[in-house]
Image (cartoon, coloured by chain):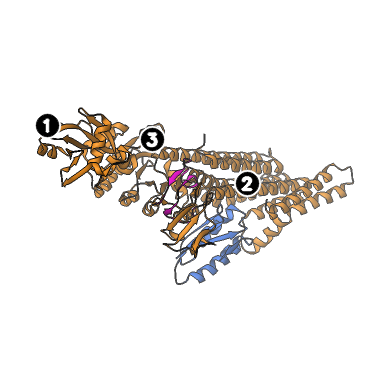
Amino acid sequence: MTGKQKKMLIRILASAVLLAAGLLLPAAEGIRSALIIAAYAVVGWDVVWKAVRNILRGQVFDENFLMAVATIGAFCLREFPEAAEVMLFYQIGELFQSYAVGRSRRSITELMDIRPDSANIERDGLLEQVDPEEVAVGDIIVVKAGEKIPLDGVVVEGNSSVNTAALTGESLPREVSAGSEVISGCINQSGLLRIQVQKGFEESTVSKILELVETSSSKKAHAEHFITKFARYYTPAVVIGAALLAMVPPLLLGESWSVWVQRALTFLVISCPCALVISIPLSFFGGIGGASRHGILVKGGNYLEALARTETVVFDKTGTLTRGTFQVTAVHPEEYSREDLLELAALAEQFSDHPISRSLRGAYGKELDPSRVSGVKEISGHGICAQIDGREVCAGNGKLMDQAGASWHPCHRTGTTVHLAVDGRYEGHIVISDEIKPDAAEAIASLKRQGVRKTVMLTGDSKRVGESTAAALGIDEAHTELLPDGKVEQVERLLGQKASPKGQLVFVGDGINDAPVLSRADIGIAMGGLGSDAAIEAADIVLMDDQPSRLALAIRISKQTLRIVKQNIAFSLGVKGLVLLLGAMGLASMQAAIFADVGVMVLAVLNASRTLRVGKN
Amino acid sequence: MKKRLNLTDLDCANCAAKMEAAIKKIPGVQDASVSFMTQKMTVDAEDGRFDEIMQEIIRVCRKIEPDCRIQY
């Protein structure tokens, strides 16, 4: 609790004691009334003071004014206990609200506690601790075990595992060694790392993310706009209602003034829209905070709200559904063992830097002996021929096999095929293709379960590869061999085909080359945003790690948040409406009204703070 | 120019909404947002008159919520 809140708590307790004494002590009427007035003064003087001050400044329908009028009205009707109780409850509610909101705010800030405090920079062999903002690009910084990496850079020395959980929600640590790129905000878990800084602090991932999270509350959801607008009319309407209620029945029907004035005061007590005004933004704030814990950065409440109505999801293929790196996916030898065939291919390709050669070496995985290979000839557009252990080995496409005089056959698997011939004899082939991410099929299935009507895949890749990927994943529609502007066209066509006007079209890409599509879609989602500025900038939502299944989680978080928002709107409006009705009929006292009002607010705030935990089962 | 400012003692959510509406009405302000949750204000206003506009914003906010201080 802050000092201000503690002071308020003491005032509330003192007032409660005075009030209890005033109500229960067997003393003279005058003394008891004095005690109750004291209780009111202790807890409510600032409300009355603010009301007076605000009226002088031209602010009429302000909650302080309403509370002051209601309670002073009660005093005039000689309802002393009522006035004191209403003020007491009101202040308890205010205190609770300020405490609860402060706590949610704090837990979200803690959640996003990725800001590094200092950087260790090496100068003349001595370590010096400096502000990360003072470190320049190219400087070498030292990150000890347990410290946060303060700036983006490349490891020049040291091995360690880094924990990216604060950024991506992924708990598995990542191994890094010399040459690895590291991102600010990760925690160095084991060894000492020397890192060459590549980006200044302002440009670092950490600063970008913090900026994004901090500005996210400025893009408000429809529900938030609705509530602000509602609040603007609600209070004046209730006050006018109260005025009519106080005057019309006594004037027209000759009813008792005191009865109707009292009913009108009940109206004033519940005229503050606090519960709604506070719980709706709190819900979205909590939902955005909860999502960021899972490595899902949402740039505004509006996007979080729209995500729940996702109807069509359009995926980019490479880098989004597939890894975007080439991997050996099949080895089909004729007579050799799989291992031997792979070894031959890796040996033949060991001096080449082509991505295919790299993946062959990667798949073989063992140390290669360069002395076994001689006379390497790279035949452009065909492949490689080399002498390995005295035999003539050719590795390449069908044309190379024809040249070598080997009788080869094509493979049924999709991807790039590397055929091998040894001394003119065909020995089989190896298929290299882009690998589908392990959670991609599950991601599509869970999107369907979430009620997404259509999933579409767009790719620049060939028809055969694209369609087989789409079929393997259970995607409804695939469009292949597209150029970047073709992707925009497809998205525009799909936007026109939406089944309901409120349905949303989501585009998910890896943020490379798809900025135009990201901005054209209703909601653009960039995946694997770590380190990619373009993605963070162009997208509305950034998935920090590269798992497509996070999208389904994001939609679930969005739906949970909206459910809580709707519950709060319905519940608060329902109770307020009911109390207004009962108050007008004389069935609800002022105490009941304030109790309902504060109660609704407490429950709505508690309900809203559940959003902080959304996405956790 | 866009600027983000910290607010202290912004105690009521409704006031934040009122402040936002009032700031948006100030001539020269392109966009403004007052977040009760983050206790921050974002103002996008004309470059040349930014300081002048800021003074007006402070004046308007003091009228609505005298306890709230804008750290400018």
> Which disc is residue A100 wearing?
2
Instruction: Tell me how far mark 2 sits from mark 3, CA to CA.
Output: 38 Å
Q: Residue A530: x, y in percent?
A: 41, 49
Residue A265 seen in the figure = yes
Relative to residue A97, is residue A562 drawn left or right?
left
SS type, badge 3: loop
Query: Pointer 3: what residue?
Result: A439
Disc 2 and disc 3 in contact, CB within 8 angstroms? no
Label 3: chain letter? A
Q: How far across and down, in percent of the image, does residue A555 sit? A: 43, 39
Which kind of residue does numbered mark 2 sit on?
A: Ala
Q: CA distance from mark 1 to mark 3?
A: 39 Å
Query: Which of the pair A98/A372 is nearer the observer?
Result: A372
| Amino acid type assigned to the residue bearing label 3 in the image | Asp
Chain letter, disc 2 residue: A
Question: Numbered disc 1: what chain?
Answer: A
Name the tint of chain B in the rendering.
blue
Q: Nearer the viewer, mark 1 or mark 2?
A: 1
The foreground one among A289 and A49 is: A289
Q: What colour do you see for chain A? A: orange
Please state the horizontal and vertical placement of residue A218, each as a whole percent of the image.
48, 54
The stretch of residues the image draws in magenta is A149-178
Is residue A156 shown in magenta?
yes
Picture quadrant of residue B15 = bottom right
Q: Residues within 10 Å of mark 3 (few under 14, many from 20)?
A: some
Three-letter amino acid code at the position of disc 1 = Ser
Reading the chain from its start, which is encountered first: label 2 or label 3? 2
Left or right: residue B51 compared with residue A76: left
